[in-house]
Image (cartoon, grey):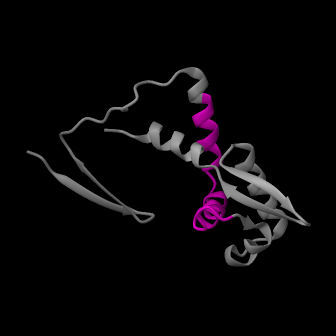
């Protein structure tokens, strides 16, 4: 008997049958890849960083000024800087200095790497 469940979390709808197996489509990862993916996931494990990242990603290919992130998220500029540095260090965002403000953009290849790892068939 196959049962299907649907979960809606963070706007993502997921269906899974209870009698299906899950496998990584790309196979097991080696130590180098595991360390890289773990650093990406670690950077994403903080709710504030996820919120900041979602604001930058929502702009698509446009860069986002750090000055435009404090008010919508209700956090201070030093807190924005701290969390954005973690995302840049992990390779999820790039930082470009424009005058006195830092501007951030998404690194598409980092998310392609995460998608490939999380592609469980």
- Image location of residue 116, percent across then percent down: 45, 38
In the rendered image, residue 60 lying in the magenta stretch gets the answer yes
Tell me where residue 40 sits by quadrant: top right
Tell me: residue 80, above or below residue 112. Answer: below
Tell me where residue 54 sits by quadrant: bottom right
Q: Residue at x 44, y 24 (%)?
A: 28
Rendered-image quadrant of the C terminus: top left
Q: Residue at x 8, y 45 (%)?
A: 1
- Judged left or right of residue 102, residue 24 is left
Q: Nearer the viewer, residue 114 or 100?
A: 100
Please state the extent of the stretch shown in magenta in the rendering: 35-62
| The residue positioned farthest toward the right in the image shown | 100
- Image location of residue 119, percent across then percent down: 39, 40
Q: Residue at x 73, y 51 (%)?
A: 94
In the rendered image, residue 121 lying in the magenta stretch gets the answer no
Most common secondary structure along the magenta stretch: helix
- Image location of residue 37, percent across then percent down: 58, 36
Tell me: residue 12, above or below residue 33. Answer: below
Tell me: residue 28, above or below residue 54. Answer: above
């Amino acid at each position: 008997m196959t049962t299907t469940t649907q979960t809606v979390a963070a706007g993502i709808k997921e269906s899974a049958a209870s009698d299906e197996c899950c496998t990584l489509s790309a196979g097991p990862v080696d130590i180098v890849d595991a360390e890289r993916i773990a650093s990406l996931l670690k950077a994403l494990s903080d709710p504030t960083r996820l919120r900041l990242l979602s604001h930058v990603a929502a702009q698509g290919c446009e860069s986002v000024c750090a000055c435009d992130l404090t008010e919508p998220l209700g956090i201070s500029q030093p807190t924005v800087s701290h969390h954005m540095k973690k995302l840049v260090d992990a390779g999820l965002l790039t930082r470009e200095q424009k005058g006195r403000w830092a501007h951030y953009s998404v690194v598409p290849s980092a998310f392609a790497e995460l998608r490939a790892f999380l592609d469980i068939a």
